[in-house]
């Protein structure tokens, strides 16, 4: 069940998406509440899985990684067990940064390929240039039902 967010929660998330290293005092000031309830709200958002983790975003090109690919995967079998077996194998791969079950001609899209079970067909798309890559998104009050 989705977590209900009020306007203050949404403001906290917007600020943290832009700067995950902000101090609690700065965050409280920007969101318009005092530090103790701010810390309580952030901890609740973390506990409820709204905030999954805090990370450093590394620019791949700054360390010489220029090629980025997306791979469409079509499975050879589509039964519940085969799909689960593929997903279980794929989610254990540390180097696999993104992995999505999709609609369309392919079954899944991943950004790194290694040997996985039940693959029938692959289509690789090489990213020539990244024009936009964001980690934050717009959060609205009330979730999807608005």
Image (cartoon, grey):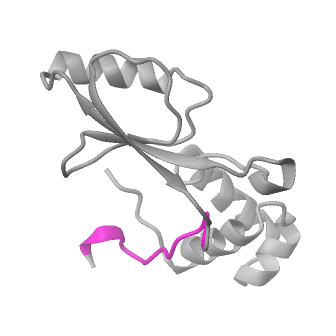
Q: Is residue 61 above or below residue 114?
A: below
- The image quadrant of residue 99 is top left
Q: Give residue 115's position: percent from left, percent from top.
A: 45, 17
The residue lying toward the viewer, choosing from 46 and 131, is 131
131, 86: nearer the viewer: 131
Percent of width and height locating residue 117: 33, 15
From the viewer's perspective, tell me whether residue 137 is left or right of residue 122: right
Q: Which of 19 and 41 is in front in this view?
A: 19
> Which is the main secondary structure of the residues drawn in magenta?
loop
> Image check: 64 left or right of 6?
right
Residue 79 sits in quarter: top left
In the picture as drawn, the residue positioned furthest to the left comes out as 79
Q: Give the range drawn in magenta.
A: 132-145
**Magenta span contains residue 15:** no
Residue plotted at (55% across, 23% down): 93
**Residue at 42% from the left image edge and 77% from the top image edge:** 141
Q: Where in the figure is residue 31, as x and y percent of width and height?
A: 71, 80
> In the image, what residue occupies the spot 66% across and 46% down?
53
Name which quarter of the figure residue 94 lies in. top right
């Amino acid at each position: 069940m989705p977590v209900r967010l009020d306007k203050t929660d949404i403001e906290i998330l917007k600020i943290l998406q832009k700067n995950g290293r902000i101090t609690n005092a700065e965050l409280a000031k920007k969101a318009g509440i005092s530090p103790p309830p701010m810390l309580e709200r952030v901890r609740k958002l973390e506990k409820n899985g709204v905030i999954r983790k805090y990370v450093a975003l590394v620019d791949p090109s700054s360390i010489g990684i220029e090629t980025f690919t997306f791979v469409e995967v079509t499975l050879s079998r589509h039964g519940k067990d085969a799909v689960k077996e593929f997903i279980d194998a794929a989610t254990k791969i540390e180097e696999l940064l993104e992995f999505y079950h999709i609609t369309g001609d392919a079954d899944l899209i991943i950004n790194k390929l290694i040997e996985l079970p039940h693959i029938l067909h692959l289509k690789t798309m090489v990213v020539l240039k990244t024009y936009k890559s964001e980690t934050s998104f717009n959060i609205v009050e009330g979730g999807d039902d608005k």
